Amino acid sequence: VQQFRDAYDEAMDSYQAALALFKLVGDRLGEANVRKAMGLVKWQQENMDQALTLLTDAYQLYQKIGDRYSQAVALYYRSHLYEATQDCLRAIEDMQQAVAFAEQIPLPWANEWKQRIETLRQTCEE
């Protein structure tokens, strides 16, 4: 709720408290979800470096626990961050991996994500 009200500092404090609890009980999915949420807050604050770090941390945790759905979503968000930082090649790579997961699961937005890859390719050529 704090995040949606643009109370980013308070949201980060709440996420830090939740992160500590998830680590304490060994809930790696909870930890990954909190790191992803924190990354999205940092993105909203336009702190791209921290956002990328947090989303990458979340993605790596999702990999370790084998959560393909969450890996796909983390890659999707990370591709937007790479695009925002003018790193089109990494944005495309992340989207390609996200699409691969989306097709395996399958997720209903796989075709939409494929279209995003084409849009990214066009953007990179400009």
Image (cartoon, rainbow, N blue to C red):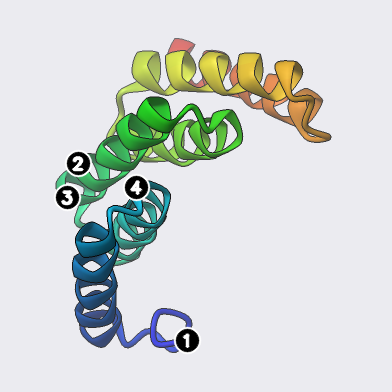
- Dot 4 or dot 3: first in sequence order is 4
The residue lying toward the viewer, choosing from 45 and 66, is: 66
In the displayed structure image, the side of residue 57 where residue 98 appears, left or right: right
Q: Nearer the viewer, mark 2 or mark 4?
A: 4
Question: Which three-letter amino acid code belongs to the residue tagged 4?
Answer: Arg
Amino acid type of the residue that numbered disc 2 sits on in the rendered structure: Thr
Q: Quadrant of residue 82?
A: top left
Q: In terms of sequence position, does the residue under pointer 1 or pointer 2 come before the other? A: 1
Residue picked out by circle 3: 50
Quick one: which residue is furthest to the front in this view?
Answer: 25
Q: What residue lies at 32% left-to-right and 87% top-to-bottom?
A: 7
Considering depth in this image, is 59 or 61 the residue closer to the camera? 61
Spatial separation of the CA atoms under disc 1 and disc 2: 23 Å
Structural crowding at the residue carrying mark 3, measured as other residues with C-alpha within 10 Å and reported as few (<14), some (14–19) or many (≥20): some
**Is disc 1 placed on a helix, strand or loop?**
loop
Mark closer to the chain start, 4 or 1:
1
Q: Which residue is mark 2?
A: 53
How far apart are the alpha carbons under marks 1 and 3? 21 Å
Q: Residue at x 63, y 20 (%)?
A: 101
Residue placed under numbered mark 4 in the picture: 28
Q: Position of residue 33 (x, y in %)?
A: 41, 54
State the image coordinates of residue 103 (x, y, percent, origin top left): 74, 17
Disc 4 on helix, strand or loop?
A: helix
Residue 126 seen anywhere in this rendered image of the structure: no
For disc 1, the marked residue is: 1
Is the residue 50 above or below the residue 121 in the image?
Answer: below
Are there few (<14), some (14-19), or many (20+) residues within 10 Å of tag 4? Answer: some
Name the mark nearer the viewer: 4 or 3: 4
Q: CA distance from mark 2 to mark 3?
A: 5 Å
The residue closer to the viewer here, 39 or 19, is: 19
